[in-house]
Image (spheres, coloured by chain):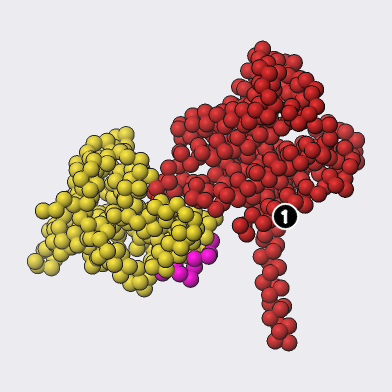
Amino acid sequence: MVEPLLRVEGVSRRFGGLLAVNAVSLSAPAASITALIGPNGAGKTTLFSVISGFLKPSAGHVRYDGMDVTGEPPHRLARRGIARTFQIVQPFAGLTVRHNIAVGAHLRHRARDVALQMAEQVGREVGLGELLDRPAHTLTVAGRKRLELARALATEPKVLLLDEVLAGLNPSEIRAIVPAIRALATRGIAIVMIEHMMQAAMSLADRVFVLAEGRIIAEGSPAEVVADPEVVEAYLGHGAAARMRAAYGH
Amino acid sequence: MKAFVPIAVVVAMLATVPAFLHSNVVLNFLVVTLMIALAGQGWNILGGYGGQYSFGHAAFFGTGAYVTAILQMRYGVNAWLGFAAGIAAGAVIGAIVGGLAFRAGLRSSYFALVTLAFAEVLRILASVAPITGAGVGILLKLDLGTRSFQFQSRAIFYLVILALVAVALVIARLLERSRFGAWLIAVRENEDAAMALGVDAFAVKLGAMIISAAITAAAGCFYVQYFLFIDAGIGYGSWISIEALLTPIIGGTGTVFGALLGALVVKSLGEGAKLITGDIPGLDLMIYGAVLILVIRFAPRGLVGAVTDAYDYLRPAAQKRAVEAAHG
């Protein structure tokens, strides 16, 4: 089997007495979409922060392209090819959409005009073509999510960590952005997405990991995961799976 | 090249001033104003473009001034070399203060307080150390001539400081058009987001601090050559820290001309008030405070921001009128 591009091995992260992430292992191969789901407070965003270098793990390793990159600072990981978006969008509010994206493009292109040109191209790709010269703070939630995606893409990543890019979007906006994400995977990027929009996540993902109370409780194809009683209980409470079996008779 | 035209026009206009203004009082006023604009432009690189508000740019101004003076008076170094060494020394102090403060992860008011503390420590050291002349300060020997960087004519000093300001304006414009500048502004807007996009925030802030310190140090070097005197209260006093941050904030932070415009407005008001009321001590500081409050209330992006807003507001109206006229 080919070594997956991103491999998380037994990562734990402790905040004082709270073990937010507990010996989590997962892997994400290139050209595929891996979904990370789980109830609120399960530790999904904390895990992303560890992978992207914003937090150092208390234990465990992060391997990227065969190299141990555990504990490297975010900017170095970005240079290696790991990009992330933020669940709480973090636009450069005072700058235009074009200049926001250009910051990402500058990572691999020194020249200002090349970066601006690339910003325009990436902006059009994610559907921000009409808004390129608008200040970022005037964008709607959907626009800001797209901007997060565009900036991360402009760094030309090999691994893309998407933290709830669909949350807060209406169904038609989701229908518009889903093909864009699918296209990125076919281009060869390893996508890991945290998602609460189950329907979208399930239709997009090749493989799903379920995180609850800091631990991976299930992994598999979308169909396997939704049939797993432990997953049902993590979302709906202890005993829910048995009650559902009794109620629906299967 | 087009981006540098406004700088060329403004500098060329200012350069013609000595041709029709011969009053030493006015020239002296303009020399001091441009010197403050230079110190303010230094602050603007770090504070305006980088969002790191320093309250201690006196540390760089004073270091530039003292190094220039000490090298000449104690070691007989040529004045021009002393001037260059003063700028370099300011940059080194910037690297030390920035390296420590940014490595420690200090942001916003904590960063401001630490810079203030560094400036105060240097002020106290300079007021007791023998090499800085302790409480007496250092008096430069009068030695008129180009070689010793001392000129009889204020017009020449005026052109020298104008040239330094021109260089600082060009540096700001180059910054705006470079990757380093884009990264610096990104750090100002959102440091975490910048880091996620591959920006080494520490290196970028440190780089900005060094450029900023060097420019403000140049103002200090110039001070010594112009007034031939430096002591701890002038070199490392809080007055210069305040003026260095006040001018770009009033003029417009993160803009090429903000510090220059701010210095012209603030200094004109200060001197104007003194002329009208007689020389009441501290009056200029009260004027600065009042202007600062007005600017923060009515033009939070400074005077440059207010002018561009007014332009953007008027332009569509003008265009609309033109369209209506065409359709008659």
Amino acid type of the residue that numbered disc 1 sits on in the rendered structure: Val
The residue tagged 1 is B9
Q: Residue at x 32, y 67 (%)?
A: A180
Q: Chain for mark 1?
A: B
Q: Which segment did they paint magenta?
A: A127-137
Q: Position of residue A236 (x, y in %)?
A: 22, 57
Q: Residue at x 55, y 37 (%)?
A: B209
Quadrant showing the C terminus of chain A: bottom left
Question: Eyeballing the image, is B138 above or below A225?
Answer: above
Q: Position of residue B198 (x, y in %)?
A: 39, 48
Q: Residue at x 53, y 64 (%)?
A: A134
- Which residue is farthest left? A250
Any part of residue A51 in sight: yes
* Count of marks, rendered view: 1
Locate residue B69 relative to residue B155 in the image: left or right. Answer: left
Q: Position of residue A85 (x, y in %)?
A: 37, 54
Any part of residue B114 in sight: no
Locate residue B245 relative to residue A105 in the image: left or right. Answer: right
Locate residue A230 relative to residue B143 in the image: left or right. Answer: left
